[in-house]
Image (cartoon, rainbow, N blue to C red):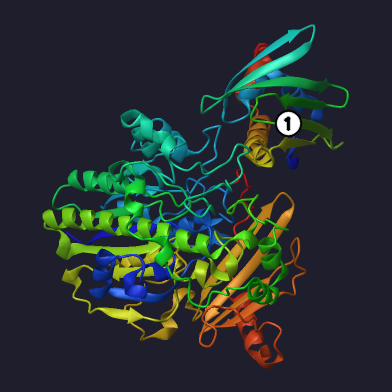
Amino acid sequence: MATLRREIRIHRPAADVWQVVGRPELLHLWFPGIVNCTVNTNSEGTTRIVTTGAGIAMPEEIVTNDALQRRFQYRITAPLFRNHLATVDVIDLADGTCLVVYSTDAEPAVMALVIGGATTGALEELRRQFESGSGPALAALKEGAG
Amino acid sequence: MGRKILFVTTDQQRYDTLGCNGGTLARTPVIDGLAANGVRYERAIPQSVVCMPSRSTMLTGQHPSTHGVWMNGVPLPVDAPSVAAVLHRAGYRTALVGKPHFEPFLDPFAKFTENRLAGEGKPTEADQPWFDGTTGPHRGFDHLEFSTHGATGPLHYSRWLAANHPEAVGMYYQVLDSTFEVNAAGGGETGAPQAHFNPIPKEWYHTDWVADRTISWLDSLAPQDDWFCWMSFPDPHHPWDPPAAEVGRINWRDVELPAGYPTTPAERERILDGKPRHWRMWYDGALVSNYEAPKHWVPATLTADQIREVHALNAVECELIDEALGRVMAAIAAKGWTDDVDVIFTTDHGELQGDFGLLFKGPYHVDGLMRLPLVWRPAPSAGLPASVVSLPVGLVDLAPTFCAIAGLSPAEWMQGKPLPVDDAGGEALSCGIGGVLTEWDSELFGVAVHLRTITRDGWVCTAYKPGYVHDGTEGELYNLGDDPRQQVNRWDDPAYRSTRTDLVADLWDSQPPTRSPRIALVAPV
């Protein structure tokens, strides 16, 4: 199992940022390279299928969506992975800003870097949208849709 | 009408694989002929011994610390400086055909322009929003057609092979295994790692494809066009899987072991134990510090016969490159351009290829990886005499050389100097320090290795920064004169303390500016 962590400080309140991070159907609007995502919820839980820019569809299981801790976790269940767990924490820095930490644990190890490496761009895009006040994820929030 | 430039690179080719450099295995008459009529460099040194940082140095004319591609898997920013853009602005038609690798290959998100462009089957990027018409399409190149070491992935060659010869796609060695690690599976007749008999016909192999597409692009040009073409062969980088029908050119059983090869395990281990710890740890399979060698292969298991077979397969690949280059030179001659074409041939870094009982590459700053083939055949119309340059030069000097050929001043952001054409004027060497710098940085899954090296006055001196197994006091010091295979590390020898002190001071005093903030590692390769 390999583990990878990326983090970024965003000059917006944690509660605001969580409104996007905690909405699994919005991922493709702030994660560059993911072009679509579909969320399904049933009695067994919540699943998501993301489609990458290369046309690869990856099924995921939503493990945690905890608005109190502002922690979101999901597991890629595609056979490429023996294990995978991604964790996004939005941490209030008590000064009107927040720290967003995106962690990837995966086996095979190389896949942690392939998938986790892309989270750098995702965090940068998340910051860009919040600090500029505009972007597709924020627009979707305003419209109340994904 | 000015001088045209054919820039030919290979990938991971040793100095001693060319006939003009004393090689006896591969027949390389085309390159040897260029050397006989041009300048042959006896100590050309990369600024990094892995692909992405080194190729980025060739394009930008900057050291890795400055352009920011500090290890494989770190993408060169799309707006990074580019000598191709300089030439494009000066009116040159520009092309890159073959292996680029300024951006990671493992890219399931199709985030990187090179992969996306090729995946869309496009030869230009002029419709991208950042294209402002002044730097040319992608990185200053008008035309791009990409390939790499096999037939998987989105690059143009893979798409061409899948569309025209789908039965051949599976013929190549699988570079990665099922866990996406570099494949350790052996093949050939000796079980050497990454050796493979590839049933693909020579005409469909990527070496010939690169030459074919280069010729096609040249055919599209007007006679009066000035042009800069980077023809970038993916070979002889592993896997060693040339077309099987060509393997009979060289019988591996007839191949002699490399000069100075320590034939007994005890001798190899004694030499390795004189070097910083990670050398022996890798040999024993105790530490794999980087992604450029198979994680599940232990170098100590490498046999003499496997070294022979790797050398033979590698030599076949070098011969195919030489022949492909010969076809391109013939096409240039047929157009009547020969007198006005400069040809520069080199590679991005070397290959250990059995040295010290090791294969592949990594944080090991010795001749196998650092002494490169470099030949410059100036345009005959320039009237420069043939010569041999023994002073050290760097790949960082290529970009300013291209500018000089085009009659342009080097861009202010370039850190090298135009290549010397003889050994006179030693003070004019790369970076103005009388020596050449090489650097290594890797941080992979908690294992960090950081090296800084200077080659100067017949010495190679490497200082280590603190890392996973290094405390920052280690180093390597080799006298190229009396120890040409770098088997005796003088770093801790009191007799050479003043030499070491002088070189280390020069090394740190001459470090290039560091890009900030550091670009994130986003892929293994």
* Residue B1 picture location, percent across and down: 16, 59
Q: Give the position of the N terminus of chain A as an image quadrant.
A: top right
* Residue B286 picture location, percent across and down: 73, 58
- Residue at image point 31% right, 51% down: B88
Chain under callout 1: A
Whether residue A85 sits left or right of residue B407 in the image: it is right
Is A33 above or below relative to B196? Answer: above
Is B145 above or below relative to B39? Answer: above
- Residue at image point 37% right, 41% down: B199
Whether residue B470 sits left or right of residue B59 in the image: it is right
Look at the image and tell me whether residue B233 can be seen: yes
SS at mark 1 in the image? strand
User: In the image shown, does B131 or B63 lie closer to the viewer?
Assistant: B63
- Residue at image point 67% right, 93% down: B495
Look at the image and tell me whether residue B410 can be seen: no
Whether residue B450 sits left or right of residue B232 in the image: it is right
Q: Give the position of the C terminus of chain A as an image quadrant.
A: top right
User: In the image shown, does B468 or B205 lie closer to the viewer?
Assistant: B205
Question: Within 10 Å of the Cα at label 1, are there few (<14), some (14-19), or many (20+) other Cα atoms?
Answer: many
Give the amino acid at mark 1: His
Quarter occupied by residue B65: bottom right
Quarter occupied by residue B27: bottom left
* Residue A12 picture location, percent across and down: 75, 32
* Residue B420 picture location, percent across and down: 35, 77
Q: Which residue is mark 1?
A: A84
